[in-house]
């Protein structure tokens, strides 16, 4: 079996550095940390995890709470979280809540009982745990949503909605629809930009569906079929959907109704997941830097765990979205 000395020799560092990396201690550069963990994997080195945890008073476990693993956005962000956690010597325990706030609360209690060192949370609408995380000063980071009192990483959804509205105006869209909920910065950015272009808010059709934000191709399809059955007209329609699966459902409905994309109906999704280039026509979407969100979320959490910024120095990192134009517009 490989020893700590073997890892140190291969990585070109001291055994003390290997020990600090494996114990999650601060003061090791990212480059050295990555080199050590790469050789830990190559040599299949198995440290005594029980002794390591006892010595450091840590579990080396990160809890990850996600609302819907079937949505490719959440699956992709989990993959990046797990990779960065592994590079830093941590394992991940996943809780998939399926959008149920009560299940989210139960999963949170379960993760606490496993003595995870910190939590990464992608909350669902109606979440009940963020206030508790803040009040109990749990080491945690929220991804995709800003919340006062807790470190957060995400993109500006408002800016995403703005970009969609600007694009629709540029390509000559005359009627506007939003598939999602009005209690969403995506909608607010979309609405405000159209109002500034002298449109009445009442002219923006909002099509709501319970739990639309889950992996929702079928929900998008049914909503679009019902909507287009009563709103088919000669003027060109722009549909902004709250996520890519929902937008894909809209695409299928428009195709089944034998309407032209993008000449009659232009469609934009959100997240720019892998499905956007996998479907035909390819889907225009708002790009989120998913890999960067995952990396920054883990690094922020590890900084808290390892004695980084104080409680008063909460960090809200807001990244810029981008519009990726494809065939649906």
Image (cartoon, grey):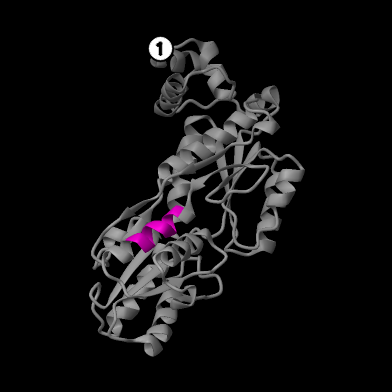
Please tell me which residue is depicted at 27% across the width and 61% down the height of the picture: 278
- Residue 81 in percent (x, y) is at 49, 42
- x then y, percent, for residue 225: 39, 84
Task: Give the residues drawn in magenta, as a range.
Answer: 159-166
Q: Nearer the viewer, residue 279 or 57?
A: 279
* Residue holding disc 1: 12
Res 36 → quadrant: top left
Number of marks present in the image shown: 1
In the figure, 18 relative to 122: above or below? above
Q: Which residue sits at x=57%, y=65%?
A: 183
Q: What residue is drawn where x is 68% and y is 28%?
A: 310
Give the dominant element type of the magenta stretch: helix, strand or loop.
helix
**With 283 as the anchor, is 301 left or right in this view?**
right
Secondary element at image label 1? loop
Using a 10 Å C-alpha cutoff, classify the residue at mark 1 as few (fewer than 14 neighbours), some (14 to 19) or many (20 or more). Answer: few
For residue 72, say whether it is visible.
no
Q: Nearer the viewer, residue 196 or 17?
A: 196
Residue 262 part of the magenta-drawn span: no
Q: In the rendering, at what x and y percent does residue 128 appear?
A: 70, 57
Does 323 sit left or right of 105 as displayed?
Answer: left
Image quadrant holding the C terminus, namely bottom left
What is the x, y in percent for residue 280? 24, 67
Q: Residue furthest front?
A: 198
Q: Is residue 279 visible?
A: yes
Examine the structure image and report whether residue 162 is included in the region drawn in magenta: yes
With respect to residue 158, does 174 lie above or below? Answer: below
Q: Nearer the viewer, residue 58 or 312?
A: 312
* Image quadrant where residue 73 sits: bottom left
The residue sitting at the bottom extreme is 230
Q: Residue at x 34, y 80 (%)?
A: 253
Q: Is residue 48 above or below residue 300?
A: above
């Amino acid at each position: 079996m490989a020893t700590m000395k073997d890892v140190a020799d291969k990585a070109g560092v001291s055994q003390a550095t290997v020990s600090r990396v494996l114990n999650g201690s601060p003061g090791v550069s990212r480059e050295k940390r990555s080199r050590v963990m790469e050789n830990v994997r190559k040599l299949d080195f198995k440290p005594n995890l029980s002794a390591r945890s006892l010595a450091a008073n840590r579990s080396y476990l990160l809890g990850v709470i996600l609302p819907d693993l079937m949505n490719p956005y959440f699956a992709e962000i989990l993959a990046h979280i797990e990779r960065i956690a592994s590079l830093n010597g941590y394992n991940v325990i996943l809780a998939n809540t399926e959008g149920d706030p009560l299940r989210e609360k139960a999963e949170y209690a379960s993760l606490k009982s496993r003595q995870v060192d910190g939590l990464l949370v992608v909350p669902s609408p109606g979440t009940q745990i963020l206030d508790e995380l803040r009040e109990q000063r749990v080491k945690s980071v929220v991804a995709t949503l800003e919340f006062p009192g807790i470190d957060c990483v995400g993109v500006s959804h408002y800016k995403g909605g703005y970009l969609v509205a600007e694009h629709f105006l540029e390509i000559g869209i005359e009627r506007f629809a939003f598939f999602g909920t009005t209690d969403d910065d995506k909608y607010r950015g979309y609405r405000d930009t159209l109002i500034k272009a002298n449109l009445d808010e009442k002219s923006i059709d909002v099509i709501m569906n319970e739990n639309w934000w889950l992996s929702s191709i079928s929900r998008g399809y049914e909503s679009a079929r019902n909507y287009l059955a009563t709103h088919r007209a000669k003027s060109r329609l722009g549909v902004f959907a709250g996520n890519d699966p929902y937008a894909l459902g809209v695409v299928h409905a428009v195709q089944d109704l034998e309407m032209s994309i993008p000449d009659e109906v232009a469609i934009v999704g959100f997240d720019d997941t892998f499905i956007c280039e996998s479907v035909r026509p390819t889907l225009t979407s708002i790009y989120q830097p998913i890999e960067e969100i995952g990396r920054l979320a883990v690094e922020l959490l590890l900084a808290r765990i390892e004695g980084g910024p104080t409680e008063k120095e909460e960090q809200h990192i807001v990244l810029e979205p981008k519009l990726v134009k494809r065939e649906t517009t």
